[in-house]
Amino acid sequence: MKFNSVFDIIGPVMIGPSSSHTAGAARIGKAARNLFGKEPTWARIHLYESFAKTYQGHGTDFALAGGLLGFETDDPRMNKALEIADERNLDIEFIEDSAGVSHPNTARLIIGDDTEKIELVGISIGGGKIEITELNGFELRLSGNHPAILIMHNDRFGAIASVTEILAKHEINIGHMEVNRKDVGKEALMVIEVDQNVDDGVLKELESAEHIEQIAKISS
Amino acid sequence: MFRSAAELVEIAENENILISEVMIRQEMEMKEKSREEVFSEMEKNLDVMEKAVEDSLQGVESVTGLTGGDAVKVQEYMKENTPLSGQIVMDAVSKAMGTNEVNAAMGTICATPTAGSAGCVPGTLFAVKNQLNPTREQMIRYLFTSGAFGFVVANNSFISGAAGGCQAEVGSAGAMASAAIVEMAGGTPQQSAEAFAMTLKNMLGLVCDPVAGLVEVPCVKRNAGGSSLAIVSADMALAGVTSTIPCDEVIGAMYRIGKQMPSSLRETGEGGLADTPTGRLLKEKIFGTSV
């Protein structure tokens, strides 16, 4: 079931004009910011199909910017987000992309600062609800509804056990888990949806576990 | 957990509870929240809806100037005249358009199920309220009943114009409102499903063709259509009229129709009304480029 709460249907409370193109876009931007872990200094955003054709009219551009700045869907500053991004030295470029995609409301965000960058694909599936379908070349399905930890690691035996052991020690329950790799023995990604927000101490501990490269989290 | 309208009605009938109660219990169970928490979260949405309607009756205008002011016009007309379609229908039309005028003006609204279709549920609620005199709790329940049917549509079909056309947005919203009106008026769970089916049937095939890609024209007035149809279908269901094609099959038909819709008619602003001489001219005026 893609929708699991009545508040996915009656809600969100948001600044108009479009739930998928404004509220959903803001949530994609916010998920990207969360995954990056800090405010980016630049963003290149590819827009596809309906997003590409109508983003100016729907405020998809300022909503994505608002999300990158950490705004919620009902933040009254939303329609000023492009100006605010400018003031905060966040440089955003929008690219209308004609490549084929599987969902009409698709955005590919490449965001970063001087030292790091991430690339992800988000889709807005209606009523303000979103899914992250790709991160750094890995396919995944992340709703952003639950707190989650995303762990880039090397595909070696013991890597998953070392992570789950730490979570078990801190009594953190795993609701859903997915492991994906580029090739045998190469880069891999663990997506772990948990029941409660994970504090930074636990993340630090996970970071120093064996074969772990990079960690991001989504709070809810 | 219910997956279809038939299951939703069955649970309500077997346990002898309202549709809204089925939704409330499911939400409590899924989110491990108390009844008070779930109710107060929904009440916040109701407050936002009420505020949006109030704001619209003061008169609003969108940035482009394409929409705004029609909600007020209808209210003034109602004061001076006896509307041919009746006070409640015209009141719903005014408040539904008003909510979407606020949305188009980038004001704060509650998506039900989307922003473009946000007028139907509150528009009908604040109109039938004058005759049915609901308690605050019944008004909150109205939103749970709407949400229960919207939940079925969202999980079996779609609720976004980009995915399935306007039938998925205003079609779903109007149908959700029908089901909620029936419950508030004292109808049975099955009558809610019949009303839902009858509204959605009349919205099948409706395309999403916003002029200049903006949620303004024709969205604002389609909410007028959706909310008036919602009241008519509710009355029909309360009179005992049933839908020959069952509710879930109507939802299935909506899904297949949406799948067959070309991209130009799914919120790309390329076809339909967007691609009329006036639609193209308005786009050029607003964005300085032609379609």
Image: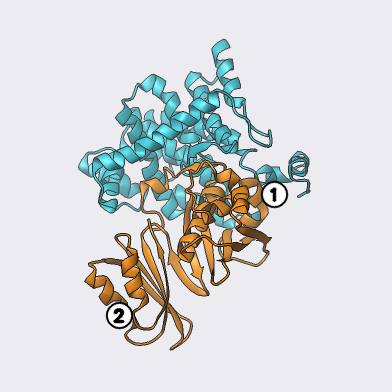
- Tag 1, which secondary structure? loop
Residue A162 shows in this picture:
yes
Q: Nearer the viewer, residue A3 or B176?
A: A3
In-front residue for pair B159/A77:
A77
**Chain appearing in orange on the rendered image:** A
Task: Give the amino acid type for the residue marked by disc 2 in the picture.
Answer: Ser
Image coords of residue B266 (percent x, y): 61, 51
Chain in cyan on the image: B
Q: Which residue is mark 2?
A: A162
> In this view of the protein, which residue sits in the foreground, B168 or B52?
B52
The quadrant of the picture occupied by the N terminus of chain A is bottom left
Q: Nearer the viewer, residue B143 or B257?
A: B143
Q: Are marks 1 and 2 in contact (CB under 8 Å)?
A: no
Rendered residue at 38%/35% (across/down): B180
Q: Is residue B7 left or right of residue B197?
A: left
Quarter of the C terminus of chain A within the rendering: bottom left
The answer to whether B50 is drawn above or below residue B2 in the figure is: above
Kindly identify which numbered label has been placed on residue B248. Answer: none
* Amino acid at dot 1: Gly
The percent position of residue A68, horizontal first and vertical second, equals: 53, 56
Kindly identify which chain the residue marked by label 2 belongs to: A
Q: Are marks 1 and 2 on the same chain?
A: no
Q: Read off the residue under disc 1.
A: B271
Q: Label 1: how many residues lie within 10 Å, few (<14), some (14-19) or many (20+)?
A: many
Q: Is residue B242 visible?
A: no
